[in-house]
Image (cartoon, rainbow, N blue to C red):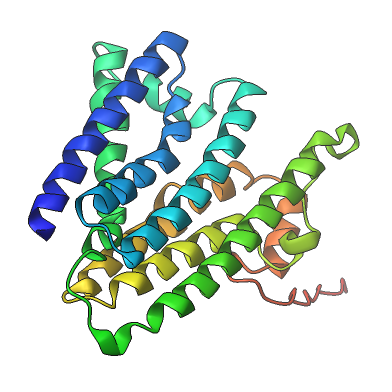
Amino acid sequence: MIGRLLIISLVLVMLYMTLWFMAARRRQRLDTVDSAWGGGFAVIAWTVVVQQPSARTLVAAVLVTIWSGRLTSHLAKRSSQGQEDPRYVEMAKKWKGDLWTRAYWSIFITQGLLIWLIGLPLVLNAGILHDQWAWLTNLAIIIWFAGFIFESVADNQLSRFRSDAANKGKNMDHGLWRYSRHPNYFGELVQWWAIGLLALQVAWGWIGLVGPLLLTILIVFVSGIPPIEKKRKDNAEYQAYKKRTSVLIPLPPRTVQTKERK
């Protein structure tokens, strides 16, 4: 059963990303793929519900759809108000041969595979339930909503800050951003570790923790935090903010001692 769900979900995610590739090519914008990210997980979640309906799979699908809808709307709005994401512009400059052929495999199909891997707990959640672990559903829902609220508030605070022309060139360092340099990423990871908890109720569900672990690695070490930090390495205000503020987990600001000149 699980093997069949894994294959079906993989095929559907690849088809889903192919459709988004066609939309991106029509728009002539590679960053269209960002708007596809959240929906890919909803595809997996609802595929599982259709194939293996249960209260657990339905709960997971609803939670992921709420997360996906908010994230997709947020990213689509951001994309419509600006130009092509510079990350993709720089990436494309290094490619040889046909741009869109390379983009299909290197961006859309690659991200499709990542979606499938990160979404493993959604599939494994359909396995045989261990009754003694059923209480994890309530705990996972509570943790998930805490992460959702945290991410939503962080994104809204940043959007309002950036929409004020008086803040152009300034660094966001209040609200949740006073306690973490990337509170939106923290909230997102909390939600996905909660989804991982759901899968722990079933046989072999611990394998599903590969999903949130992979997402954590990507955000902390690869494509999430590092590019943002690198972009601001020459910004003195941001470097001062960096010294006093936790990178991800919200913590009280550190007191930075300055050396006195002799």
Residue 133 higher or lower than 224, as above or below: below
Q: Residue at x 36, y 47 (%)?
A: 41
| Residue 246 occupies quadrant | bottom right
Q: Is residue 116 left or right of residue 212?
A: left
The answer to whether 21 appears left or right of 189 in the picture is left
Task: Look at 29% across and 76% down and name the residue there.
Answer: 200
Residue 262 vertical position relative to residue 167 in the rendered view, above or below:
below
Q: Is residue 11 above or below residue 197?
A: above
**Where the N terminus falls, by quadrant?**
bottom left
Residue 128 seen in the current view: yes
- Residue 178: image quadrant is bottom right
Position of residue 152 measured from the top left corner of the image (x, y, whole percent): 65, 53
The image position of residue 253, as x and y in percent, is: 75, 73
Q: In this view of the protein, which residue sits in the foreground, 196 or 82?
A: 196
Q: Residue furthest bottom?
A: 132
Q: Is residue 121 left or right of residue 80?
A: left
Give the camera-side residue of 87 and 69.
69
Q: In which image quadrant can residue 240 be found?
A: bottom right
Asked whether 209 or 179 is in front, the reply is: 209
- Image point 24% across, 16% down: which residue? 101
Number of marks in the rendered image: 0
Residue at horizontal 42 percent and vertical 57 percent from the top: 221
- In x, y percent, where is residue 70? 57, 44
Q: Quadrant of the C terminus?
A: bottom right
Can residue 236 be seen by looking at this rendering? Answer: no
Q: Position of residue 169 (x, y in %)?
A: 79, 37
Residue pushed farthest right?
166
